[in-house]
Image (tube, rainbow, N blue to C red):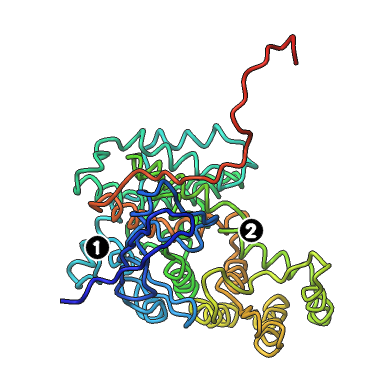
């Protein structure tokens, strides 16, 4: 039996030392279990949770130093190249890639849940036509619990599975309806003869006036985007879903909370920021000037799409997205696309310039995904919505894992109080 490893925390003020167990995961650095620290009446201070594991999980693993991302142990590059999105969804939700029979059964369960309650469609009329689609997504996804309340017992595994399937199936429908409402087009119902990604494109771009046939290469490109964004460890939106879920909130409310967190520009809006940056640069000849500005500490300009809080090496998703970007632009005859040319030149500089190399500012997945979505004619205000569709499977898988965890407790972070000390109330006449 392996000897139990202990870290000892000592104090210089006479407080007795505390023994803290050292835990080892399957992969990654060891973790110090600080729960015994509560015996001293003290706790840790860690803004942004940079050094804190809030849970244990077996879903996704990131090695930021080496630039690896695994879903249930499978490298993301292999899944993006060889698997379909619903295969990956099955993997994240259930733990394993499906057999052919299970794959067909899972796809059928999703396919026949893609429609939304007819009354839910009236919700859209309560929003202005120019409302941001993410605002509508937060409201409508949260409202699902008012229509599908027959399976909201979070302690019932069957109820949790039904809710998960409903979310995976209905979020693309809701998202496409957000787009149609925004541009004043009639809603398009799901088509059960189409695959998951193709069906979303159909609901986005088809009209009742004429048939719509999605280009298979473009369908595959969007499928890769979905796979690459399906989960990413304990990021801000996933942590939000878990924190909301720790209170016992229903899964629809938890995912709506995740969508709200994703809406933040520091999280889900990075690919949109990349396109705005390229627009600002304007031409490949202007790149040296903007690179110089990025290096200037006194200039607020930043190169978007470079570096990552977790990855200290190349984002493994970026390589896949770069290849996908080239394939899409070639298919559409846009190889000489000005934005893609600027992106390639910026990438070349980042991989050769000592300033970027020393700071490990490599292109990340957002650097290319915005160019692909733009080529697919997805409007800027729908970029984060696409992200939300992809991440729904990650959110609901993480939520389900949390609910099943015997160590689950309601999330309750502590604080370092820096406010006023105790003071007595003074009547208004004496102030």
Helix, strand or loop under label 2: helix
For discs 2 and 1, the disc positioned in front in the rendered view: 1
Q: Nearer the viewer, residue 41 or 53?
A: 41
Q: How many marks?
A: 2
What is the quadrant of the C terminus in the image?
Answer: top right
Helix, strand or loop under label 1: helix
Residue at figure coordinates x 51%, y 54% from the top left: 45
Q: Nearer the viewer, residue 328 or 236?
A: 236
Q: Is residue 51 left or right of residue 265?
A: left
- Residue 336: percent from left, percent from top: 69, 83
Instruction: Name the residue carrying label 1.
Output: 94
What is the quadrant of the N terminus in the image?
Answer: bottom left
Q: Nearer the viewer, residue 397 or 342?
A: 397
- Residue 426: percent from left, percent from top: 67, 15
- Residue 407: percent from left, percent from top: 26, 52
Residue at figure coordinates x 61%, y 42% from the top left: 418
Circle 1: is it few (<14), some (14-19), or many (20+) Cα within 10 Å? Answer: some
Instruction: Name the residue carrying label 2.
Output: 380
Is 112 above or below relative to 20? above
Residue at figure coordinates x 71%, y 71% from the top left: 303
Marker disc for residue 391: none
* Residue farthest top in this picture: 429
- Residue 338: percent from left, percent from top: 73, 77
Q: Is residue 242 left or right of residue 300?
A: left
Q: Is residue 316 visible?
A: yes
């Amino acid at each position: 039996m392996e000897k139990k490893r202990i870290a000892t925390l000592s104090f210089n003020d006479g407080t007795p030392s505390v023994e803290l167990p050292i835990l080892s995961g399957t992969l990654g650095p060891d973790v110090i279990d600080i729960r015994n620290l509560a015996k001293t009446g003290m706790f840790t201070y860690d803004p942004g949770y940079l050094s804190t594991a809030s849970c244990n999980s077996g879903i996704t693993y990131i090695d930021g130093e080496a630039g690896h991302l695994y879903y249930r142990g499978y490298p993301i590059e292999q899944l993006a190249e060889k698997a379909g999105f619903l295969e990956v969804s099955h993997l994240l939700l259930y733990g394993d890639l499906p057999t052919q029979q299970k794959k067909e059964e899972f796809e059928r369960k999703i396919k026949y849940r893609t429609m939304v309650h007819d009354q839910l469609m009236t919700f859209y009329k309560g929003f202005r036509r120019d409302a941001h689609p993410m605002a509508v997504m937060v409201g409508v996804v949260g409202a699902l619990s008012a229509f599908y309340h027959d399976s909201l017992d979070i302690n019932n595994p069957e109820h949790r599975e039904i809710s998960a399937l409903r979310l995976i199936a209905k979020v693309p429908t809701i998202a496409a309806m957000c787009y149609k409402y925004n541009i004043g087009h009639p809603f398009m119902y799901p088509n059960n003869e189409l695959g998951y990604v193709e069906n979303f494109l159909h609901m986005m771009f088809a009209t009742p006036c004429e048939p719509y046939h999605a280009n298979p290469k473009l369908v595959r490109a969007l499928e890769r985007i979905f796979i690459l964004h399906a989960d990413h460890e304990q990021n801000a939106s996933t942590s939000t879903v878990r924190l909301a879920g720790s209170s016992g909130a229903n899964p629809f409310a938890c995912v709506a909370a995740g969508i709200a967190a994703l809406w933040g520009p520091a999280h889900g809006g990075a690919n949109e920021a990349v396109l705005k940056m390229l627009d600002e640069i304007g031409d490949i000849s202007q790149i040296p000037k903007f690179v110089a500005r990025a290096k200037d500490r006194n200039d607020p300009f930043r190169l978007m799409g470079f570096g990552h809080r977790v990855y200290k090496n190349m984002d493994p998703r970026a390589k896949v997205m770069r290849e996908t970007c080239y394939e899409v632009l070639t298919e559409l005859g846009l190889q000489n696309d000005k934005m893609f040319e600027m992106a390639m030149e910026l990438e070349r500089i980042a991989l050769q310039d000592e300033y970027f190399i020393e700071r490990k500012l490599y292109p990340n997945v957002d650097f290319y995904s915005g160019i692909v979505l733009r080529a697919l004619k997805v409007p800027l205000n729908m970029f984060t919505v696409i992200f939300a569709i992809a991440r729904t499977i990650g959110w609901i898988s993480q939520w389900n894992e949390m609910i099943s965890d015997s160590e689950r407790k309601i999330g309750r972070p502590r604080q370092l109080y820096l406010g006023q000390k105790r003071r007595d109330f003074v009547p208004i006449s004496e102030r």
